[in-house]
């Protein structure tokens, strides 16, 4: 079947598609758009229901065909009728669309169409005037195969990685002992039992805040995102675990949804992804702060083992005691070595040794001082002898005398010339053994 080319769109809620509340389409605007000739309605001149329905149908008929992707949530095959009814739901939002098609499209599909199948359909929006309902009349249905789903997942990985959502530097560390753990998982699931039982076995006082949501199929993404936002807003929640058991690629598709991945990246609380088993790797594993191989592994990563921690405390305490004892023994040995040294065993030896040195130096100083005194005494004797030989006393002893004039009004003066000793001059004469006075009679 040939169909005209058209843009592929994704069914989404108005808030997600436009970021706000979509503008209302009033009957007057529909009428003006559809016919452009009818006047506006009023309280005095209202439009009948048939007019409003007709104008709405005329406006919708002008929209043309569109490609739509979604997930089949309800499939009604009515034998003997010419129409089958489907409900197409957006996997990432709580938005659905009624679809009608020929039963031949369902029976001749190369892949069996069941509830949960991802499909891309070509259809024309239709408004049924009699019932006042809207639906998408589909003329072609293309199941989305596993290969296409995996290719889309890879494209989403490349997009998120380019935006930096996989950057290890953005990963937040897990708390050592969380006050309360948020758990998002299926109701009465094995993943919930594993996480809770393992956590309680490792730390009996652990506390959980559990949110049970759908973990596959239509509506799973919206419920998980809503639960994640609630737990992230709770200040008592220190870490959030998103857990699910293993499954097929189709079953794990909600955990590779872009909306969920971005919600995990924008959360302020550390998020642990525990989806499937070790081989499973949905996109949310790369965005989450910690990837756990299984739900049991997530419990082990988030909750410390009280037995192991107590054993570690005992080991650390024993190591501290051993290290302290070793240090004390080492210091005792050092003190013993210091005490056994000769200088401390017989401390007077060092004093005696210095006493002997002092006595030796004192004796040497005494000898040096005596020698110096003897030398000085000899020098003094020699100097005295030279002084005695050169002094006036020795000269006087040889018969010489010192004659001084004794004036009446002044000090005595040595007479060195006969001219100074005129007749009648009083003189004083010094000889070896004394002094006597005489009177000069003049020169001869």
Image (tube, rainbow, N blue to C red):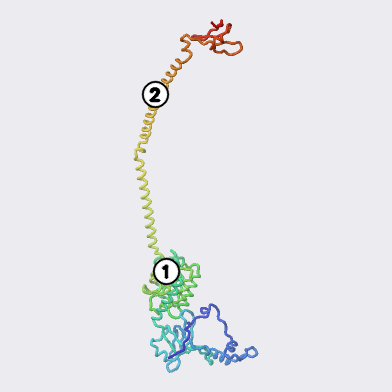
Mark 2 → mark 1, Cα distance in angstroms: 97 Å
User: In this rendering, would 414 be left or right of 88?
Assistant: right
Q: What residue occupies the far bottom of the structure in this picture?
A: 80
- The quadrant of the image that shows the N terminus is bottom left
Question: Image height check: is 389 above or below 184?
Answer: above
Residue plotted at (60% across, 13% down) = 410
Please state the total of marks drawn on the protein image: 2
Which numbered marker is on residue 371?
A: 2
| Image quadrant where residue 363 sits | top left
Residue 190 appearing in the image: no
Question: Image height check: is 173 above or below 387?
Answer: below
Residue count near mark 1 (Cα–Cα under 10 Å), binned few <14, some 14–19, many ≥20: many
- Identify the residue under disc 1: 290
Nearer-the-camera pick, 190 or 168: 168
**Picture coordinates of residue 4, whole percent (x, y):** 46, 89
Q: Earlier in the sequence, mark 2 or mark 1?
A: 1
**Picture coordinates of residue 171, whole percent (x, y):** 44, 67
Q: Secondary structure at mark 2?
A: helix
| Image quadrant where residue 197 sits | bottom left
**Picture coordinates of residue 308, whole percent (x, y):** 38, 62
């Amino acid at each position: 079947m040939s169909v005209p080319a058209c843009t592929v769109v994704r069914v989404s809620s108005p808030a997600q598609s436009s970021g706000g509340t979509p503008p209302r389409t009033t009957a007057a605007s529909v009428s003006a758009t559809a016919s452009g000739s009818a006047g506006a309605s009023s309280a005095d001149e209202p439009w009948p229901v048939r007019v409003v329905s007709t104008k709405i149908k005329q406006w919708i008929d002008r929209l043309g065909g569109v490609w739509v992707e979604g997930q089949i949530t309800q499939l009604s095959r009515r034998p003997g009728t010419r129409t089958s009814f489907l409900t197409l739901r957006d996997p990432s939002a709580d938005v659905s669309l009624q679809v009608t098609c020929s039963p031949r499209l369902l029976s001749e599909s190369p892949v069996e169409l069941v509830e949960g199948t991802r499909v891309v359909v070509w259809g024309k929006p239709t408004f049924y005037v009699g019932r006042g309902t809207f639906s998408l009349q589909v003329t072609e249905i293309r199941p989305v195969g596993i290969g296409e789903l995996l290719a889309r997942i890879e494209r989403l990985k490349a997009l998120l990685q380019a935006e930096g959502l996989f950057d290890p530097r953005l990963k937040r560390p897990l708390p050592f002992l969380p006050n309360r753990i948020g758990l998002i998982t299926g109701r009465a699931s094995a993943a919930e039992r594993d996480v809770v039982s393992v956590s309680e076995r490792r730390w009996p006082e652990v506390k959980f805040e559990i949110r049970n949501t759908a973990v596959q199929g239509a509506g799973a993404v919206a419920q998980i995102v809503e639960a994640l936002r609630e737990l992230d807003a709770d200040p008592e929640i220190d870490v959030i675990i998103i857990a699910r058991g293993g499954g097929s690629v189709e079953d794990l598709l909600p955990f590779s949804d872009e909306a969920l991945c971005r919600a995990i990246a924008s959360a302020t609380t550390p998020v642990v992804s525990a989806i499937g088993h070790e081989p499973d790797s949905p996109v949310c594993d790369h965005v989450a702060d910690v990837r756990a191989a299984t739900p049991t592994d997530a419990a082990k990563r988030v909750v410390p083992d009280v037995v192991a921690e107590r054993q570690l405390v005992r080991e650390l305490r024993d190591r501290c005691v051993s290290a302290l004892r070793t240090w004390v023994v080492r210091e005792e040995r050092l003190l013993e070595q210091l005490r056994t040294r000769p200088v401390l065993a017989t401390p007077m030896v060092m004093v005696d040794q210095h006493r002997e040195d002092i006595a030796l130096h004192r004796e040497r100083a005494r000898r040096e001082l005596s020698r110096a005194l003897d030398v000085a005494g000899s020098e003094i004797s020699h100097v005295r002898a030279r002084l005695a030989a050169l002094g006036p006393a020795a000269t006087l002893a040889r018969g010489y005398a010192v004659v001084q004039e004794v004036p009446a009004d002044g000090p005595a003066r040595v007479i060195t010339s006969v001219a100074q000793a005129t007749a009648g001059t009083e003189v004083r004469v010094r000889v070896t053994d004394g002094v006597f006075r005489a009177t000069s009679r003049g020169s001869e």
